[in-house]
Amino acid sequence: MTRLLHLVLVLLAMAALVPWVSLHPLGLTIVAPCVLFAIALFFVRPASGLWVLPTLWPIVDLAPLTGWIHFPESMALVLTLVTGVGLREALRPPPPHADGSPFRATPAALLLFAVVTTSYIVSSIRGGATLPPYDPALLAGYKTPLNAVRLLVGFVQCLLLLPALHAIGRTTGPGAARHLSLGLVAGLGVAALAASIERWQFPGLTNFSSDYRTTAQFWEMHVGGATLDAWLALTFPFALAGFIRNRSPAARIAYMAIIAVAAYAILTTFSRGLYAAVAVAVPLLLILNLRRSGQDSTASLNTRQWGVWLAALALCAVAPMSFAGGGYRGLAALLGLTWLAYLTGGLRARPSRMAAWIAMLAGTAAGLAAFPISLIPKAVYVFFGLLCLAGIAVTLSGWRHERMSLSLAAIALTAACAPAATAVGIHWGEGKGTDGIVLASLAVAAFALFQHGVRPIWQTNAHNATTSVLVLGLAAALAASLGSYYVGERFSTTEKDLEGRLTHWRAGADLVNRQEDALLGIGVGRYPDAYYWSGPLAASAGIWKIDQVDGNRFASLGAPRHVLGFGELFRVSQQVPSDAVPPYVFRFRARGHDNTGIHLEICRKHLLYTHECSGAAAHVPKGDWQHFEVTSRPGDSDHTPPDDSLLFSFAVSGRAALDVDDLDVIDGRGVSILANGDFHAGTDFWFFSSDRHHLPWHAKSLPLHIWIEQGWLGVFATGLLVLGATARMLVGRARALPIAAPLTAGLAGFLVVGLFDSLLDMPRMTTIFYLTLWLALVIRRRAPLPAGI
């Protein structure tokens, strides 16, 4: 029966893959070999799918290049995995692993997913999720019948993956969960690296003040959304858990590198929702790990380390205060003080509490000399530096020699550095932010006081030295980014933005105006179209579609209804060759439904926000088709080839709709650089974006989105599924598994992001969300996982 199921799934997957490959804009010669290679890989090495899929998930889609937003490459990746694993199971099933599978589909899990599946079926029927005859015009935008199919695909992909997941688990044994965890960590690293490269190419790695929101390779954010935020929130706990549990120095360094890049990516999203998600997920992960350490003697954490992680969280909380008042020098002094306090945990000789208290009081008194010294220009920096270096030297000597005098001197010097670090921050900030600087130094001093005067809460050694470096790095990154002007502006407008979001939520809820809609939803994928026709008139950012008259296809752009700014244009774009050079000649035919205008440009652009543009504009009168030829303004752009971030875009710059056909762009070498300019191939190579106006496409709340499209049935089904999965991870049998803590923390982070974004209107997130919930429901304790995930 199982072999028959896999054979049926293979046939279904192939039925979808064959037309996908044959119609793909990049052509058979590129796409077919990639698909065949993936199928062969998953056939020969099925377990590779557990890490290949999550690793490639953030970067596999090529929609900005191909224009395919409904059937992207991530769908093909899923289908190749189903095909490869299914063929192996149907033709030559391998023997089961001796330790059994870590996954077991329980009746409860099947029932919960059956309820969610029922909700999707009902809302899909109501949303018109049928596959019409192929027409390239249907692939333009999110207001065609294919949008219902697009969103349904996200959930169907999850269902298709479940048999493959269990087949791999049956033959791989306990290693299956480990492969999946490592794949999620690799996926985090890949996404974070893509985000970092994007920032390096555009605003700059250290530019924390520009209004630039990173998107990495999540093309779904072309009309806003929090796809990157959700992925980072879901996967970050897996990397942190792996770092905490792994004892191999090389592995810990690798995890630390991924965490560092991921932390940078998280901070530079400037997303308040993601910040909140991480603030929930990380403490939850630490609590669950510490709880598990009391149940599992092999765990590398123990209950005594509560103080260590409390100290780490406290440092991350106070470091931005020190930076706000004392700048980089105040922050450096705080981190130097912290590092010295940490090093004293390795002193071989342990003085009595009374002796430690006396040493700390004496050191604090000596450190107060920094304040009168600060009257001399820059002398306080020298004073603190000498104290800190002397403290490090004495402490390291105390590591090697068990002498009480060395330990007391190290403790005294550490105490002296606390007021000296405070003086550094106050001197640099010229008295501004004194309260935060003092609080930050007192917090570090308090933990050092507890360590030596009450009860030791950490012990410095080679194993946890990497942890201290990671914590110091994260604290510095937090301080530098959260203390930036742009982040301050973001948080200062939180109340106003929340009011705007509440207004948008009310407008979204108003789309449900019948009792039947409230119960069953208006239909999967119907939100953008319903909001366009029934939402606030001034909210529409624009629309584009492919029309056809007498066999001739052309692009039709609807005019936006909101107040236009340069960054608020609704753009239709195409990537152009990296060696294109200005000036550019734009040739096209156009007609206006009324007097209107067209804007044309070639810019450096990743997904959102234009840079270094070379453009032109033309007035398009009402009437029949007319030919136009305009040249880009000289001196507009200073990009130099080769540049692989060049995009050609056109947009309506007036208030009337516009039809465009026979587009061509000739660069400075006399070379035509556009493909499918006559739109004969529909949307192939054409992609659209709204850089700053995002609300018309998203309900901006996961529960609200589910209710609008799937009704109370969907809310009940998904809510029950989430409760069942989290309960099993928190209080059920699975709570003792190493994967339980990061899985629970990741889901919590994902759901916090979902409080302020729809998420499930992005198929890649739908698939990974439900797949994670399934994993939480079926992972079992019988086959224990390796300690280092």
Image: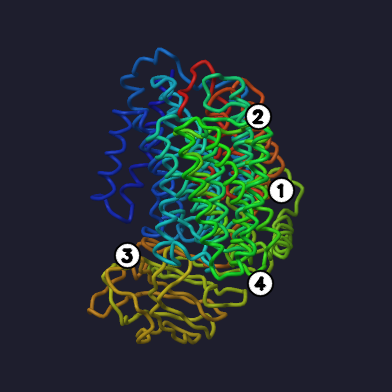
Residue farthest toward the right in the current orientation of the protein: 515
Q: Secondary structure at mark 3?
A: loop
> Can the viewer see residue 498?
yes
Name the residue that disc number 2 marks.
724
Residue farthest toward the top in the current orientation of the protein: 98
Residue type pointed to by label 1: Asp
Distance, label 1 to label 3, CA atoms, is 46 Å
Q: Nearer the viewer, mark 3 or mark 4?
A: 3
Instruction: Tell me, yes or no, whether the two marked residues, 3 and 4, touch with CB atoms within 8 Å.
Output: no
Horizontal and vertical percent for residue 276?
64, 49
Q: Secondary structure at mark 1?
A: helix
Instruction: Choose between 474 and 601: the one closer to the eye.
Output: 474
Residue type pointed to by label 2: Gly
Q: In the drawing, what numbered circle is on residue 517?
A: 1
Q: Earlier in the sequence, mark 2 or mark 3?
A: 3
Label tally: 4
Q: Nearer the viewer, mark 4 or mark 2?
A: 2
Q: Residue drawn 52% across and 46% down?
A: 391
Q: Nearer the viewer, mark 2 or mark 3?
A: 3
Q: Earlier in the sequence, mark 1 or mark 3?
A: 1
Q: Secondary structure at mark 2?
A: helix
Q: Earlier in the sequence, mark 3 or mark 4?
A: 4
Distance, label 3 to label 4, CA atoms, is 36 Å
Q: Earlier in the sequence, mark 1 or mark 4?
A: 1
